[in-house]
Image (spheres, rainbow, N blue to C red):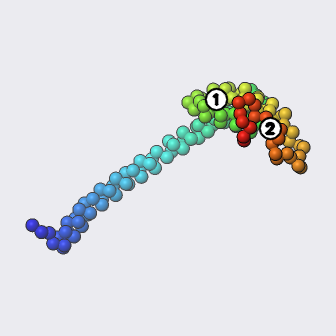
Amino acid sequence: MTISNDDRKSIIDEVVGIIKPMISEAVNKGKEEALLSLPEVWANLVTDHLAIAKEKEEFYKKHPKFKEHKDAVTAAIAEVDGKNPFLSLKEKLEMAVPEIRHRIKTKASLDMETINKSPDLTFKKFNPGPGLNGDI
């Protein structure tokens, strides 16, 4: 049995006519569910943001000297977070305190005022230590 092109076209049109509304209904249902979830998602984001702000405020009250060194605080917390992603923010902040102090101490020892206009680029003074061949 052979199907003519006209019959084939009418069958395809009929199937498309059946499937198209079904697809449209499914897409619309998905859109509706996504839109209905937005208020909850937004509320969760705002709540999380406020909780984080509160934790940071308490942290800086406990360690007021750190306010001047937010770059060191951010870097240390990022390091702790990378190693311990499932801890609470409060735990991460407390774990970061020794590293923050170390970074502040290191930064204080750096001379950021003096500029050496002709630095030694030969690395003749480079001492790689034992077991290293001196290659950079």
User: Would you call the spot at circle 1 few (<14 residues within 10 Å), some (14-19), or many (20 or more)?
Assistant: many
Q: Quadrant of the C terminus?
A: top right
Mark earlier in primary sequence (1, 2): 1
Residue 80: where, in percent of width, then height?
Answer: 64, 31
User: Would you call the spot at circle 2 few (<14 residues within 10 Å), some (14-19), or many (20 or more)?
Assistant: few
Q: Image point 27% across, 59% down: which residue?
A: 19
Q: Which mark is residue 92?
A: 1
Residue 67: where, in percent of width, then height?
Answer: 77, 35
The residue lying toward the viewer, choosing from 43 and 94, is 94
Q: Image point 32% across, 56% down: which residue?
A: 23
Q: Image point 23% across, 62% down: which residue?
A: 15
Quadrant position of residue 83: top right
The residue lying toward the viewer, choosing from 70 and 45, is 70
Q: Secondary structure at mark 2?
A: loop
**What's the residue type where badge 1 is placed?**
Lys
Residue 62: where, in percent of width, then height?
Answer: 74, 26
The residue where tag 2 is placed is 126
Mark 1 against mark 2, which lies toward the viewer? Answer: 2
Q: Image point 39% across, 50% down: which residue?
A: 30
**Is 43 left, or right, of 27 in this rendering?**
right
